[in-house]
Image (spheres, helix red, strand yellow):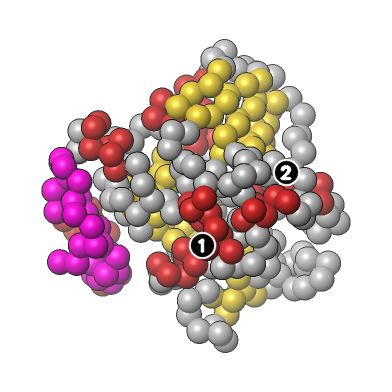
Amino acid sequence: MLIRKAPIAGLTENDVTPKRLYMNRRKIMAAGGAVALTAACSGPQPDAEAQSAARAGAGEPLSFRETAYTVSDGELTPYDAVTGYNNFYEFGVGKSDPARFADAMTTDPWSVEISGHAERTGVFGLEDIIDFNALEERIYRLRCVEAWSMVIPWIGVPLSTILEQFRPTSDARYVAFETYLNRDEMRGVRFPVLDWPYREGLRMDEAMHPLTIMAVGLYGEVLPNQNGAPMRLVVPWKYGFKSIKSISRIRFVAEEPETSWKQSAPREYGFYSNVNPNRSHPRWSQSSERVIGAGPFTRRDTEMFNGYDEVAPLYAGMDLNEDY
Ligand SMILES: Nc1nc2c(c(=O)[nH]1)N[C@H]1C(S)=C(S)[C@@H](COP(=O)(O)O)O[C@H]1N2
Ligand SMILES: [Mo]
C-alpha cells in the first residue's frame, strides 16, 4: 500500500487513505455498490489526541464515515487538479497562485468569531465547533460560474450541526460568513480585486439544508490551504463562489448580507448563485461546463441546481432568472 507519510500514532493503516488506493476503492465502489465499501472502510475511531494531531497539517489523514451522499455521477477529479487549479483570490487571481502561495497562511491555531442573533456567541477554537469524530465524506460536484466543474471527495460535517450549537434565534434569517484576512500572509489582498475580507452568505434554510457541509478535508486528508483550510463551506447546488474558504467569522443576521462577488459585479453575480443553465452569465453561456482533469475538450451539460433537485422546494415561488 502506498503511504506518503508515516501514520500518526493512534491511526492504523486502515485509517490512512492514500490517493491511489482511494481511486481504486472508488472504482470498486462504482462496480460493486456503496454498501460493501462502507463495511470495508469503517475502522476504529481514533482518539481525540490523534484527531487533533491529524488536523495539524494539510495532507495528514483524517478518519471519516462513508455516507450515502455519493450523489454525483461523474468520475473523481484527479487530486492534482483539485489542489492545483483553484480560486482563492486572497493569494492571487491565477489558477495556480493558491497552490503556490497559500502555504503562507497560518491555520493552526484557528479561531472563529460567532456573533449576531444567537443565544451563544463568542470566539471559539476550530476543535470547539467541529466534532472531528463525526466527519463524513460527501462526493460533490463543485461548479464554478466560469463554467468548469470538478467532482471532489470532501470530508466534513453538515453545517447545521455547527450552527445549531449556537442556538440561533428567530431573528436569524441569514448566516453571513467571512474569510480570514491577513495582509502579511495573503499576497493577493494588496490588489482591490474584491472588497476584502471575502464575504458570503446563505439564507437560514439553505444553511441548514442537509446537503450543505463545512469541509475540513478532501481525498481523506486535511484540507490543503489552497482549498480553504482549515474549514470552508461546500454548497453543492450553487456556484462555487458561495463555498467560502478559511472561515473566521460567522454572523446570524436578519437581513440579506453583503457578499463579495455581488458587491463587485451585481449584474454578474447574485446572492442566490444557484446553478441555472438557462440564465447566462452576461459574458458567457452557462449551459455546459468544462470537466477539469478530463482533457481539454471534455464538457458536460450543466444541470439545474447542479443535479441536486432535492433543493428545488427551497426556491418554490422564486424566479431564479431574477433572483440569480
Ligand atoms: N475566501 C475565498 N473563498 C473562495 C474564493 C476566493 O477567492 N476566496 N473563490 C471561490 C470560487 S470562485 C470557487 S469556484 C471556489 C473554488 O474552490 P476550490 O479551489 O477548492 O476548487 O472557492 C470559492 N471560495
Ligand atoms: Mo468560481
Name of the residue lying farthest toward the front: 184
Whether residues under marks 1 and 2 lie with C-beta atoms below 8 angstroms apart, the answer is no
Name of the residue lying farthest toward the right: 267
Q: Residues within 10 Å of mark 1 (few under 14, many from 20)?
A: many
Quadrant showing the N terminus:
bottom left
**Is 92 or 16 nearer to us in this picture?**
92
Give the amino acid type for the residue marked by disc 2 in the picture: Trp
State the residue position of label 1: 99
Q: Which residues are magenta?
A: 1-30
Image side of residue 233 versus residue 58, left or right: right
Taking the image as drawn, is residue 183 in sight? yes
The residue that appears at 64% across and 75% down in the rendered structure is 288
State the residue position of label 2: 196
Q: Secondary structure at mark 1?
A: helix
Residue 183, placed above or below residue 91: above
Q: CA distance from mark 1 to mark 2?
A: 20 Å
Q: Is residue 145 magenta?
A: no
